[in-house]
Image (cartoon, rainbow, N blue to C red):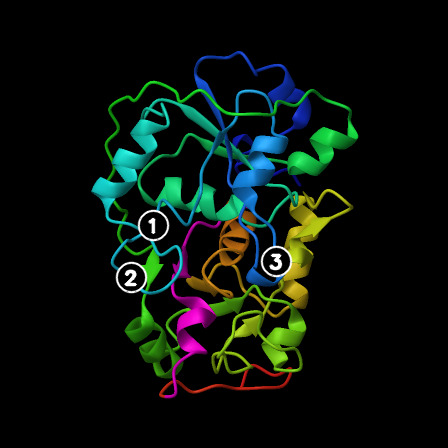
Amino acid sequence: MTFANPSSLVSTEWLAGNLDNPSVRIVDGTSHLPTARRNADEEFLERRIPGAIRFDIDDVKDPDSALAHMMPPAEIFAAKVGAMGISNETLVVVYDVYGLQSAGRVWWMFRTFGHSKVAILNGGLPKWLDEGRATDSGPVTAPGAVSYSAAMAAGKVRDLDAMRSNIDSKAELVLDARAAGRYTGEQPEPRAGMRSGHIPGSLSLPFTDLVEGPHREMKSADDIRTVLSDAGVDPSRPIAATCGSGVTACAIAFGLHLIGHDDVAIYDGSWSEWGARDDTPVATGSEAG
Protein backbone atom coordinates (compact mmCIF):
# COMPACT_ATOMS: atom_id res chain seq x y z
CA MET A 1 0.00 0.00 0.00
CA THR A 2 1.35 3.41 -0.96
CA PHE A 3 1.21 6.54 1.17
CA ALA A 4 -2.02 8.51 1.07
CA ASN A 5 -0.01 11.76 1.03
CA PRO A 6 3.21 10.92 -0.85
CA SER A 7 4.03 14.55 -1.70
CA SER A 8 4.67 15.22 1.99
CA LEU A 9 7.80 13.04 1.90
CA VAL A 10 10.52 13.86 -0.64
CA SER A 11 13.60 11.84 -1.52
CA THR A 12 17.19 13.01 -1.53
CA GLU A 13 17.21 12.38 -5.30
CA TRP A 14 14.27 14.72 -5.78
CA LEU A 15 15.78 17.42 -3.61
CA ALA A 16 19.14 17.19 -5.37
CA GLY A 17 17.34 17.91 -8.61
CA ASN A 18 15.49 20.88 -7.15
CA LEU A 19 18.24 22.75 -5.29
CA ASP A 20 17.96 25.65 -7.74
CA ASN A 21 14.18 25.60 -7.96
CA PRO A 22 13.05 29.11 -6.91
CA SER A 23 9.72 27.78 -5.65
CA VAL A 24 11.45 25.49 -3.12
CA ARG A 25 12.90 26.61 0.21
CA ILE A 26 14.99 24.12 2.21
CA VAL A 27 15.00 24.57 5.97
CA ASP A 28 17.13 22.93 8.65
CA GLY A 29 14.76 22.33 11.55
CA THR A 30 17.25 20.59 13.86
CA SER A 31 16.69 20.76 17.60
CA HIS A 32 18.63 18.75 20.17
CA LEU A 33 17.60 17.37 23.54
CA PRO A 34 19.28 19.17 26.46
CA THR A 35 21.32 16.05 27.27
CA ALA A 36 22.88 16.07 23.78
CA ARG A 37 24.94 19.16 24.67
CA ARG A 38 25.02 20.17 21.00
CA ASN A 39 24.45 23.51 19.31
CA ALA A 40 22.25 23.21 16.23
CA ASP A 41 23.01 26.76 15.06
CA GLU A 42 26.75 26.15 15.08
CA GLU A 43 26.36 22.80 13.34
CA PHE A 44 24.26 24.47 10.64
CA LEU A 45 27.07 26.91 9.89
CA GLU A 46 29.55 24.04 9.74
CA ARG A 47 27.56 21.87 7.34
CA ARG A 48 24.18 22.12 5.65
CA ILE A 49 22.37 21.22 2.46
CA PRO A 50 23.10 23.88 -0.21
CA GLY A 51 20.62 26.72 -0.12
CA ALA A 52 19.20 25.76 3.27
CA ILE A 53 18.18 28.29 5.86
CA ARG A 54 17.83 27.77 9.58
CA PHE A 55 14.42 27.29 11.23
CA ASP A 56 15.02 27.35 14.99
CA ILE A 57 11.97 26.21 16.96
CA ASP A 58 13.39 28.04 19.97
CA ASP A 59 13.23 31.26 17.98
CA VAL A 60 9.90 30.74 16.20
CA LYS A 61 7.95 30.35 19.44
CA ASP A 62 5.62 32.02 21.91
CA PRO A 63 7.83 34.60 23.66
CA ASP A 64 5.43 34.84 26.60
CA SER A 65 5.51 31.16 27.55
CA ALA A 66 7.85 29.83 30.21
CA LEU A 67 7.89 26.50 28.37
CA ALA A 68 10.30 25.82 25.53
CA HIS A 69 9.31 26.32 21.88
CA MET A 70 5.57 26.65 22.38
CA MET A 71 3.46 27.57 19.35
CA PRO A 72 3.68 31.31 18.64
CA PRO A 73 0.76 33.56 17.76
CA ALA A 74 0.00 33.61 14.04
CA GLU A 75 1.45 37.09 13.57
CA ILE A 76 4.82 36.05 15.02
CA PHE A 77 4.95 32.93 12.86
CA ALA A 78 4.08 34.99 9.77
CA ALA A 79 6.76 37.59 10.50
CA LYS A 80 9.48 34.98 11.17
CA VAL A 81 8.64 32.89 8.13
CA GLY A 82 8.30 35.89 5.81
CA ALA A 83 11.76 37.01 6.93
CA MET A 84 13.07 33.63 5.73
CA GLY A 85 11.95 34.46 2.20
CA ILE A 86 9.10 31.97 2.40
CA SER A 87 5.80 32.95 0.82
CA ASN A 88 2.47 31.16 1.06
CA GLU A 89 3.22 29.60 -2.34
CA THR A 90 6.67 28.28 -1.43
CA LEU A 91 7.22 24.54 -1.17
CA VAL A 92 9.06 24.11 2.12
CA VAL A 93 11.29 21.04 2.52
CA VAL A 94 12.36 20.36 6.10
CA TYR A 95 15.24 18.21 7.32
CA ASP A 96 17.19 17.65 10.51
CA VAL A 97 20.53 16.05 11.40
CA TYR A 98 18.95 12.89 12.81
CA GLY A 99 16.89 11.83 9.80
CA LEU A 100 13.67 12.47 11.68
CA GLN A 101 13.39 14.06 15.10
CA SER A 102 12.54 17.76 15.11
CA ALA A 103 11.80 18.07 11.39
CA GLY A 104 8.33 16.80 12.17
CA ARG A 105 7.76 19.73 14.51
CA VAL A 106 8.58 22.26 11.80
CA TRP A 107 6.37 20.38 9.31
CA TRP A 108 3.50 20.40 11.81
CA MET A 109 3.91 24.11 12.58
CA PHE A 110 3.60 25.02 8.91
CA ARG A 111 0.59 22.74 8.49
CA THR A 112 -1.10 24.12 11.60
CA PHE A 113 -0.70 27.67 10.32
CA GLY A 114 -2.35 26.73 7.03
CA HIS A 115 0.71 26.02 4.86
CA SER A 116 0.01 22.71 3.13
CA LYS A 117 2.98 22.93 0.72
CA VAL A 118 5.49 21.47 3.16
CA ALA A 119 7.39 18.18 3.07
CA ILE A 120 10.03 16.31 5.04
CA LEU A 121 13.25 15.06 3.46
CA ASN A 122 13.24 11.29 3.89
CA GLY A 123 16.44 10.29 5.67
CA GLY A 124 17.36 13.90 6.37
CA LEU A 125 20.96 15.07 6.48
CA PRO A 126 22.37 11.62 7.38
CA LYS A 127 21.18 10.11 4.10
CA TRP A 128 22.24 13.19 2.14
CA LEU A 129 25.77 12.90 3.53
CA ASP A 130 26.04 9.13 3.10
CA GLU A 131 25.19 9.58 -0.57
CA GLY A 132 28.13 11.96 -0.91
CA ARG A 133 26.01 14.93 -1.91
CA ALA A 134 27.27 18.51 -1.78
CA THR A 135 27.07 20.66 1.34
CA ASP A 136 27.59 24.32 2.19
CA SER A 137 29.25 25.93 5.21
CA GLY A 138 29.89 29.35 6.62
CA PRO A 139 27.59 32.35 7.08
CA VAL A 140 24.28 32.41 5.24
CA THR A 141 23.15 35.36 3.17
CA ALA A 142 19.76 36.32 4.52
CA PRO A 143 17.04 35.91 1.90
CA GLY A 144 14.89 38.87 1.02
CA ALA A 145 11.84 39.17 3.24
CA VAL A 146 8.48 38.51 1.63
CA SER A 147 4.87 38.88 2.71
CA TYR A 148 3.42 35.87 4.50
CA SER A 149 0.00 35.35 6.07
CA ALA A 150 -0.85 32.75 8.69
CA ALA A 151 -3.92 31.61 10.58
CA MET A 152 -3.90 28.81 13.12
CA ALA A 153 -6.16 25.89 12.24
CA ALA A 154 -8.72 25.02 14.89
CA GLY A 155 -8.34 21.85 16.91
CA LYS A 156 -4.66 21.13 16.29
CA VAL A 157 -3.18 22.17 19.66
CA ARG A 158 -4.05 20.77 23.09
CA ASP A 159 -3.39 22.48 26.40
CA LEU A 160 -3.19 21.24 29.98
CA ASP A 161 -6.91 21.59 30.67
CA ALA A 162 -7.86 19.66 27.55
CA MET A 163 -5.52 16.82 28.49
CA ARG A 164 -6.88 16.72 32.05
CA SER A 165 -10.45 16.52 30.76
CA ASN A 166 -9.56 13.79 28.31
CA ILE A 167 -8.50 11.43 31.10
CA ASP A 168 -12.16 11.07 32.06
CA SER A 169 -13.85 11.68 28.71
CA LYS A 170 -11.47 9.53 26.66
CA ALA A 171 -12.64 11.55 23.68
CA GLU A 172 -9.17 11.29 22.15
CA LEU A 173 -6.66 8.50 22.10
CA VAL A 174 -3.42 9.84 23.59
CA LEU A 175 -0.15 8.57 22.10
CA ASP A 176 3.20 9.13 23.82
CA ALA A 177 6.15 9.46 21.41
CA ARG A 178 8.90 9.23 24.05
CA ALA A 179 11.13 6.18 24.47
CA ALA A 180 9.40 3.29 26.19
CA GLY A 181 11.56 3.60 29.32
CA ARG A 182 10.50 7.19 29.83
CA TYR A 183 6.86 6.19 29.37
CA THR A 184 7.11 3.43 31.99
CA GLY A 185 9.11 5.63 34.35
CA GLU A 186 12.12 3.31 34.31
CA GLN A 187 14.33 5.91 32.61
CA PRO A 188 14.84 9.45 33.93
CA GLU A 189 13.66 12.48 32.01
CA PRO A 190 16.35 14.53 30.21
CA ARG A 191 15.03 17.73 31.78
CA ALA A 192 15.62 18.45 35.44
CA GLY A 193 12.72 18.48 37.87
CA MET A 194 10.47 16.12 35.93
CA ARG A 195 8.58 13.22 37.44
CA SER A 196 8.79 9.96 35.51
CA GLY A 197 5.88 8.11 33.92
CA HIS A 198 3.04 8.98 31.59
CA ILE A 199 -0.39 10.56 31.35
CA PRO A 200 -2.96 8.04 32.62
CA GLY A 201 -4.75 6.36 29.74
CA SER A 202 -2.09 7.17 27.16
CA LEU A 203 -0.46 4.54 24.97
CA SER A 204 3.26 4.21 24.29
CA LEU A 205 4.23 4.74 20.66
CA PRO A 206 7.91 5.72 20.45
CA PHE A 207 8.34 7.82 17.32
CA THR A 208 11.40 5.75 16.42
CA ASP A 209 9.06 2.81 15.77
CA LEU A 210 7.82 4.64 12.67
CA VAL A 211 11.26 4.87 11.06
CA GLU A 212 13.93 2.40 10.03
CA GLY A 213 17.61 2.18 9.17
CA PRO A 214 20.55 4.41 10.06
CA HIS A 215 18.96 7.45 8.38
CA ARG A 216 15.61 7.12 10.15
CA GLU A 217 13.70 6.85 6.91
CA MET A 218 9.94 6.44 7.18
CA LYS A 219 8.67 2.90 7.16
CA SER A 220 6.26 1.85 4.44
CA ALA A 221 2.55 2.59 4.77
CA ASP A 222 1.85 -1.07 5.56
CA ASP A 223 4.59 -1.19 8.17
CA ILE A 224 3.32 1.99 9.82
CA ARG A 225 -0.14 0.46 10.04
CA THR A 226 1.38 -2.66 11.61
CA VAL A 227 3.25 -0.56 14.19
CA LEU A 228 0.03 1.22 15.09
CA SER A 229 -1.89 -2.03 15.37
CA ASP A 230 0.80 -3.60 17.56
CA ALA A 231 0.62 -0.58 19.88
CA GLY A 232 -3.14 -0.92 20.19
CA VAL A 233 -3.84 2.21 18.16
CA ASP A 234 -7.03 2.65 16.16
CA PRO A 235 -5.95 5.41 13.72
CA SER A 236 -9.55 6.20 12.83
CA ARG A 237 -10.07 7.66 16.30
CA PRO A 238 -9.26 11.30 17.12
CA ILE A 239 -5.71 11.36 18.46
CA ALA A 240 -3.68 13.67 20.66
CA ALA A 241 0.06 13.06 20.57
CA THR A 242 2.46 13.98 23.36
CA CYS A 243 6.19 13.62 24.04
CA GLY A 244 8.83 15.47 26.05
CA SER A 245 8.27 19.01 24.80
CA GLY A 246 5.93 18.82 21.82
CA VAL A 247 8.61 17.95 19.25
CA THR A 248 8.71 14.21 18.49
CA ALA A 249 4.94 13.98 19.02
CA CYS A 250 4.79 15.70 15.63
CA ALA A 251 6.56 12.68 14.08
CA ILE A 252 3.52 10.65 15.10
CA ALA A 253 1.28 13.24 13.45
CA PHE A 254 3.45 13.01 10.34
CA GLY A 255 3.31 9.22 10.20
CA LEU A 256 -0.46 9.24 10.54
CA HIS A 257 -0.71 11.96 7.90
CA LEU A 258 1.26 9.81 5.45
CA ILE A 259 -1.33 7.03 5.74
CA GLY A 260 -4.26 9.42 5.45
CA HIS A 261 -5.19 10.26 9.05
CA ASP A 262 -5.06 13.96 9.89
CA ASP A 263 -7.35 14.05 12.93
CA VAL A 264 -4.32 14.46 15.18
CA ALA A 265 -3.62 17.20 17.72
CA ILE A 266 -0.40 17.91 19.63
CA TYR A 267 -0.23 18.51 23.37
CA ASP A 268 2.14 21.45 23.08
CA GLY A 269 3.37 21.51 26.67
CA SER A 270 3.75 17.72 26.73
CA TRP A 271 5.77 16.17 29.57
CA SER A 272 7.75 19.38 30.14
CA GLU A 273 4.52 20.81 31.48
CA TRP A 274 2.70 17.73 32.80
CA GLY A 275 5.69 16.11 34.49
CA ALA A 276 6.90 19.32 36.14
CA ARG A 277 3.67 19.92 38.06
CA ASP A 278 2.56 18.37 41.32
CA ASP A 279 -1.16 18.52 40.53
CA THR A 280 -1.25 16.26 37.47
CA PRO A 281 -1.76 12.49 37.78
CA VAL A 282 1.07 10.26 36.64
CA ALA A 283 0.94 6.55 35.78
CA THR A 284 3.95 4.24 35.59
CA GLY A 285 4.61 0.81 34.15
CA SER A 286 3.86 -0.56 30.72
CA GLU A 287 0.08 -0.32 30.92
CA ALA A 288 -1.89 2.75 29.89
CA GLY A 289 -2.98 3.19 33.52
What is the crowding at mark 1: few (fewer than 14 residues within 10 Å), some, or many (at least 20)? Answer: some
Residue 139 position, x and y percent, is: 51, 25
Q: Earlier in the sequence, mark 2 or mark 3?
A: 2
* Amino acid type, label 3: Phe
Residue picked out by circle 3: 207
Residue picked out by circle 1: 61
* Amino acid type, label 2: Ser
**Element type where label 2 sits in the image:** loop
Instruction: Say if 159 sits above or below 131 in the image.
Output: below
Seen at 64% across and 37% down, the residue is 124
28 or 155: nearer the viewer? 28
Seen at 39% across and 72% down, the residue is 273
Gap in angstroms between the C-alphas marked 2 and 3:
26 Å
Q: Is residue 173 visible?
A: no
Instruction: Say if 175 sits above or below 276 in the image.
Output: above
* Amino acid type, label 1: Lys
Residue picked out by circle 2: 65
**Element type where label 3 sits in the image:** helix
- Total number of numbered discs in the rendering: 3
Magenta region: which residues?
A: 258-278
Do the numbered discs 2 and 1 sit on residues whose CB atoms are within 8 Å? yes
Q: Is residue 164 visible?
A: yes
